Amino acid sequence: MKRIIITTLFTLSLCLGCSSEKSDTGKNALVIYVSHPLVIVNPLVDDFKAKNPDINVDVIAAGTGELIKRVESEKSNPLGDVFWGGSLNTIKPKADLFENYITTNEASFLEEYKNVEGSITRFTTMPSVIMVHTNLAKNIKIEGYADLLNPALKGKIACADPLTSASSFEHLDNMLYAMGNGDPEKGWDYVKKLCANLDGKLLSGSSAVYKGVADGEYAVGLTFEEGGASYVASGSPVKLVYMKEGVIVKPNVVSVVKNAKNMENAKKFIDYLTSYDAQKMVNEKLNRRAIRNDLPPSEILLSIDKINVIEDNEDIVEANKQKWLDKFRDIFTSI
C-alpha cells in the first residue's frame, strides 16, 4: 500500500535589518539563499552586517533541494548571489550552477577541506547523528542504526525525504556504507527494514526532524549534529547518538551563484564566513566544527577521536546519487 508523505516545507524570506526596498541589484546589495537553521544564520549575518554596514542584506531561507531548483530556474536571470547550505555530496553534482572562486582564507583551511572543485567553498563539518528524546525513548537502547528497527519505535522515527533534505541524503549515504560494511549496495536490505519502521511518515525538511524530536512528536530523529546539539546545549531532554556502525563526516558548503548580480559582495560574504572570527564563533558558540587549521577542536561537541568515523567513496556517491534517491522513493512508496 502506498503511504502518505507528510510535507512540512519551510520557506522563509527574511530582511535582516536591510532597507525596505528590493535589494537584488546595486552595488550595496546581497541576496543570500540559505538552508541552515536561523540560529546559525542570524548571528553570522548580523556580524557580517556590523562589519559591512553599507551592504543591504536579504536572506531567503528554505530547504536545500528547493533552493537548488530555484537557482536552476533563475539561471538566465539570477536573483540570488550566495548559496549557503547543503552538503558537499549534494552540491558537487550541481557545481556548474556556481562561479569559480577561491576565498582569501583558503590557505588557513585544513587540507581535506580545500576547494578542489573551484566553485565550492567548505564552511563547516557536520557528522550525521541520531537525535533521541530521552523522555520518550525511555529504556529503549539506541546506539546505532540497527536499534532503529526495534518495533517499539515504529512510527516514532523522524526522517526527512532525502530528495529534498541534504542532511537526510547524508544519512542515506551513511547507512548504506555503514550497514553494508563499506559496500553501499549491501546496505539496501537495512533501508527496506527502516522504511517499514517509519510507518509511512516522511518529512520534507531537515528542520522538521530536529524540531519534531525536541517537541516530543518523535522519539528519535535522523539529523545532523548541530541540529540536535543546539537543543542539548539549551537543556532540552534530548541526546545525540553517534552511530556505532560508523559515522561519515562531511563538510557543508557555500558558493557564489553563477553570474550573480552582486558578485563582489557575494565573494566578500564567503571571505567573511571562512574568516578566523566567523569560524571562531561557529566553533565556540554555534555547535559546529570549524574547517580552519588555526582553531582548536570544539569544546562543546564530542571529540572526533571518540567517534567511529568511516568514509564513503565520493565518486561512487556522485555517480549514483539520483539512482539511490529513486530507489529510496520506490522502496518507501511500495511499503
Image (cartoon, helix red, strand yellow):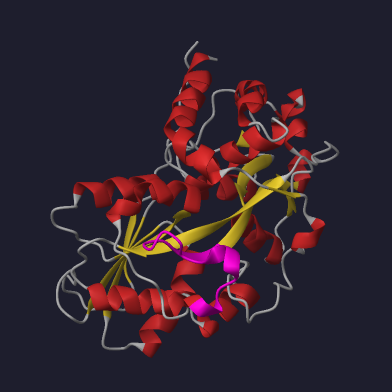
Quadrant location, the C terminus: top right
In the image, residue 114 lies in the stretch drawn in magenta: yes
Q: Quadrant of residue 56?
A: bottom left
Question: Horizontal and vertical percent for residue 147?
Answer: 77, 33
Foreground of the two, 239 or 116: 116
36 on left or right of 194: left
Q: In which quarter of the image is residue 29?
A: bottom left
Question: Horizontal and vertical percent for residue 168?
Answer: 54, 42
Q: Which residue is drawn at 66% across and 47% down?
A: 311
Question: Horizontal and vertical percent for residue 287?
Answer: 63, 67
Q: How many labels does the image show?
A: 0
Foreground of the two, 110 or 229: 110
Q: Which residue is drawn at 54% across and 29% down?
A: 201
Residue 211, placed above or below residue 268: above
In the image, residue 286 lies in the stretch drawn in magenta: no
238 on left or right of 43: right
Residue 46 visible, this orientation: no
Foreground of the two, 209 or 73: 73
329 on left or right of 189: left
Q: Residue at x 49, y 48 (%)?
A: 89
Residue 107, placed above or below residue 213: below
Q: Which residue is drawn at 45% across and 53% down?
A: 86
Residue 91, placed above or below residue 122: above
Residue 187 visible, this orientation: yes
Residue 2, placed above or below residue 289: above
214 on left or right of 7: right
Boundaries of the magenta span: 107-124
